Amino acid sequence: MKEIDYINDRLEDQIEWYDKKSLSSQRIYKWAKGTEIVLAAFIPVVSLSLNNVSLLVSVMGALIAIIEGILNIGKYHENWIEYRSICETLKHEKFMYQTKSGVYKSETDTFKYLVERVESIISKENVNWASMHRKEKEG
């Protein structure tokens, strides 16, 4: 594989994928947490201002529990942080490679070294993902 093909077809593709997944997880997490906060804040207000509100307060409490459960199952906060970290690490590798800086300034075969480092980063994330999901199934 040629250098330009690898950078465009593999590295840029992975950077874009992790960026999109990070942003998606961030949006879901922030929306859900914001909804939880609003619901929780309104429970005392509703309790004091309306008569016969036990059903409404119960529904609001149940919604908070459901949202928190969905966030826990989907691991949106963890994914947001992990995907952003990997995206930025891949960008860092790309820029260091392109400027022949850091670990790339002394290497003789910099392209091969880039491929090894990028694939190691991606592989490590895949192993972490599989490990996390294996623990979920066992638990």
Image: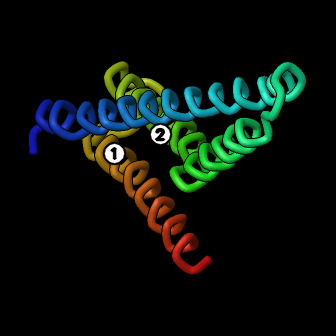
Q: Looking at the picture, which amino acid does disc 2 mark?
A: Tyr
Residue 105: tell me if it is visible: no
Left or right relative to 38: residue 122: left
Residue 83's disc number:
2
Q: Secondary structure at mark 1?
A: helix
The residue sitting at 10% across, 45% down in the picture is: 1
Q: Looking at the picture, which amino acid does disc 1 mark?
A: Tyr
Q: Nearer the viewer, residue 50 or 123?
A: 50
Q: Which residue is mark 1?
A: 113
The residue sitting at 31% across, 36% down in the picture is: 17
Q: Gap in Å between the C-alphas at discs 2 and 1?
A: 23 Å
Q: Nearer the viewer, residue 127 or 90?
A: 127
Q: Residues within 10 Å of mark 2 (few under 14, many from 20)?
A: many
Q: Secondary structure at mark 2?
A: helix
Q: Residues within 10 Å of mark 1 (few under 14, many from 20)?
A: some
Residue 74: tell me if it is visible: yes
The answer to whether residue 21 is above or below residue 113 is above
| Render colour scheme | rainbow
In which quadrant will I find the C terminus? bottom right
Residue 34 x, y percent position in the rendering: 64, 25
Q: Nearer the viewer, residue 136 or 4?
A: 136
Left or right relative to 4: residue 24: right
Left or right relative to 125: residue 135: right
